[in-house]
Amino acid sequence: MSKLRETLEAGKFALVAEVKPPKGTALDEMLAPVKSLGDRVAAFGVPDNEHARMRLSALAAGRLVQEAGGEALLHLTCRDRNRLALESDLLGAAVLGLENLLCVSGDYVTLGDHPQAKAVYDADSVQLLQIVRGLMAGRDSVGLELSGSPAFFPGAVVIPEAEPLAPQLLKFEKKMAAGAQFFVTAPVFDLEKFRRFRQGLPAQSVKLLATVKILSPEEVTLATSGQWRRVYSIPEKLVQELAAAGPEEFLGRGAEVAGRLLKAIKAEKLADGVYLKAQGRADLMEKVLEAAGF
Amino acid sequence: MIIAERKPFAEIKAMVAPYKKILIVGCGTCVAVCLAGGEKEVGLLASQLKLALGLEDKRLEIGEITVERQCDLEFIKPLCDFTADYEAIVSMACGAGVQFLKQLCYLQPIFPGVNTSFIGVNEAAGYYTERCRACNNCYLGVTGGICPVTMCPKGLLNGPCGGTVNGYCEVNPEKECAWSKIYHRLELEGRLENIKEILPLRPHQRCATPGVVIHPAYKRRYGTDE
């Protein structure tokens, strides 16, 4: 059983830190958090061509994370693979020892760095979860028998501040029905909104990892200019606090804010864990953990 | 109907550059309605070519003709003898029309005068939007008359992606999210149950290309009767 699953099922607070597969073959930066954070986190999130920007294969990166002593939470996007490729990559992940999965639809190709590429979406994230469950039961998506079936701990994404929320909750319930064992949220900055979402969830017992993110200077500029168009909001006070920071102290301030959020989410039991997005940087992750008193 | 856009003039001019006598064939149905390849557009292209080549002291003889539908044998058969006098043909029909015309007029090179865009509707004068991907497995009865395959850029079947912002699409912020619309339409109709079940993976073999449809009444004629 994976450490992430064990932690969540035992009702303990799970910390997942996201690494950044390189655009290239230089691995040091990606693996630095694994070496420095070690056992302090349950798993390391490994994005799969995040934001439709081509990077090192998440499958390879996930394996490298495990070889470096960490546990991987492998993201798998429906954008880049048809059902054959999804299934064979899933089997590949299993034999390489990757158990934790985050099944996502994936940002659209035109938003990334290969805007002329063909978007696949042969399966959606709900159907991908069904495929995972089928493989675990020893069958592929057409019902053919497998010789040896994989063990996975599948999760999915939910957007707490989705507007309108009802269609998002419909999908959330379908993901549960399709076998999602845990959910990772979109970034959370507004704890009051997150509290309301948690209270209104149709399934109270579901395991939730709240995403805590360090914003980039560009994102803060966007938020102050009124051009913000994201699936999460940032309270005005927080935007001002970050905008007031000079360039040198900016990321440090962001790490402090993230640390505060992490601490509050854990103290109030708003989620079962936190998914930390700290630009894949070990030094920032350390700062967040320090600020959170971990 | 099929929506198309006239190809850029420079591209058409380059395609016909090697020839001295060409025929431009318009199509009087879809591409005429969307102002891309009907009789008027044939005339316009012919004038543009003559003017541009005239400025370069080149001569190009251009014949113009428009048929009701280039995707229908009945309308293009009479063209056969007519086209024999020309070195090349520019078809202003959709991709189907271009290929069907070429099937008959196989002696000359044929060039497309338009880019075929999609199956869509005429929302207002000169404003056309896509509605159907011809997936050959229509979901509209389940999804409240709004197509998730076409209207959601990702073609998702089981609800919105995580990128919807205030009911608008992640891909095109000016378009409403198809799944927000589907949800609200079905909610109004009291038919939300429709989308609570998980829709299975799409049967893509149904839209494997090139597609063939034989009307049940004609199966015996074409030897496909079981």
Image (cartoon, rainbow, N blue to C red):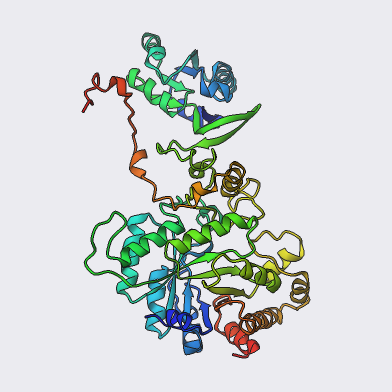
Camera-nearest residue between A221 and A123 = A123
Relative to B26, say whether B140 is above or below.
below
| Residue farthest front in this picture | B190
Relative to A16, say whether B19 is above or below.
above
Relative to A104, say whether B98 is above or below.
above
The residue depicted at 78 percent of the width and 76 percent of the height is A244
Q: Is residue B226 left or right of residue B31?
A: left
Query: At which x and y percent is residue B62?
Result: 50, 15
Query: At which x and y percent is residue A122?
Result: 41, 51
Q: Is residue B29 left or right of residue A259?
A: left
Q: Is residue B162 visible?
A: no
Q: Is residue A58 visible?
A: yes
The residue depicted at 62 percent of the width and 58 percent of the height is A165
Relative to A187, say whether A34 is above or below.
below
Camera-nearest residue between A182 and A231 = A182
Camera-nearest residue between B68 and B86 = B68
Q: Is residue A176 left or right of residue A204?
A: left
Quarter occupied by residue A166: bottom right
Quarter occupied by residue A233: bottom right
In the rendered image, the quadrant that contains the N terminus of chain A is bottom left
Q: Is residue B78 left or right of residue A54?
A: left
In the rendered image, the quadrant that contains the C terminus of chain A is bottom right
Query: At which x and y percent is residue A60?
Result: 38, 72
Count how many numbered circles sit on residues in the image: 0
The residue depicted at 29 percent of the width and 20 percent of the height is B218
The residue depicted at 48 percent of the width and 50 percent of the height is B156
Query: At which x and y percent is residue A135?
Result: 31, 64
